[in-house]
Amino acid sequence: MYGWLWRHVPGPPAVRVVILLAVVAAVVVLLFGWVFPWLEPRLPFTDVTVDQP
Amino acid sequence: MTTVQATPPPPPAHPPLRGWRLASRTLGEVLVTLGCVLMLFVVYQLWWTNVEADHAAAAATQQLQQQWERAGRGDPINGPEYPANLRRGDPFALMYIPRLGQRWREPVIQGVSLDDLAKGVGHYPDSAMPGEIGNFAVAGHRATNGEPFAYLDGLKAGDLVVVETRTTFYTYRMDDWYIVPPTQVEVIDPVPNQPDAQPKQALITLTTCNPRWASYERLIAHGVLIDTRPKSDGPPPALKQGA
């Protein structure tokens, strides 16, 4: 998977490293901004109120 | 006699993987990636939600103080303590618990949804307002999202909790905390745990999750109003350094 990715990213190795780091950064932003906030209320770590079952 | 020997082609630097080798390599990469995502989620929960919540609490506190200042231009003491049309998510008071730190201060937000609790501590909207006869009930996170009530289990009988509105400081004296199942909604009744009783006292109830890193129980602390002080008289003794 990562080998395939490396072979399909254009440019010399230094450019590839920069491109792939940018992809990783974009994935982290996506996770922190949208995926994790969506996931959080679905996990039982944040219940602090008394409530009907 | 010379023979022309065909030189074998050099082996490729990375021979392509095939079959089960490719499959097991890919599976390993997927699992390592999932592990990294899980670690990122831990970072998000333990660090980033606190960064965001501290920021949101500071913004809510500032919004409230500006609102008080604007409302105070006409009349510093009289007039409504909070806007009549209080909406979910609006801050309307500040809470101080010296036992949790001399600098511990949280905005009280109307509502107990996760969005409300990400900005401070949340007021159960159907419960009494600060100082009112009945039960002023407030929920807060014990872990993550600012975790205002992280160390609420350090609260001791006799500790004071101060609630500041635009016009008034209310001081409550707390009892020992106790643990209940999450379904025990009677703890926020006007008279806690007595659903049919008529309230005669002004109480406060704090709720948070227990144990700290799980949430299959709730930690509950009640207190009773012992002092009502107009803000023109200055902060109550509980908020003075060393009190």
Image (spheres, coloured by chain):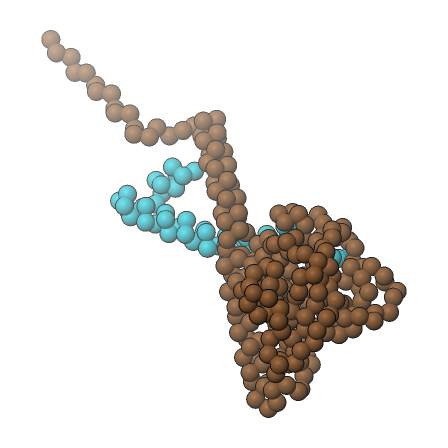
Q: Colour of chain B?
A: brown
Q: Residue at x 49, y 33 (%)?
A: B27
Along the line of sight, the residue nearer the viewer: B242 or B50: B242
Viewport quadrant of the N terminus of chain B = top left
Q: Colour of chain A?
A: cyan
Along the line of sight, the residue nearer the viewer: A53 or B176: B176
Q: Is residue B92 visible?
A: no
Along the line of sight, the residue nearer the viewer: A44 or B189: B189
Residue B202 % position (x, y): 77, 71
Viewport quadrant of the C terminus of chain B = bottom right
| Above/below status of B188 relative to B80 | above
Q: Residue at x 66, y 87 (%)?
A: B78
Report the side of B135 relative to B92 (left or right).
right
Q: Is residue B144 visible?
A: yes
Residue found at the very far left of the displayed protein: B1
| Above/below status of B214 relative to B170 | above
Residue B184 % position (x, y): 79, 55
Image quadrant where residue B191 sits: bottom right
Q: Residue at x 68, y 73 (%)?
A: B170
Along the line of sight, the residue nearer the viewer: B193 or B141: B193
| Above/below status of B225 relative to B50 | below
Residue B104 % position (x, y): 56, 63
Report the side of B109 relative to B196 (left or right).
left
Image quadrant where residue B100 sits: bottom right
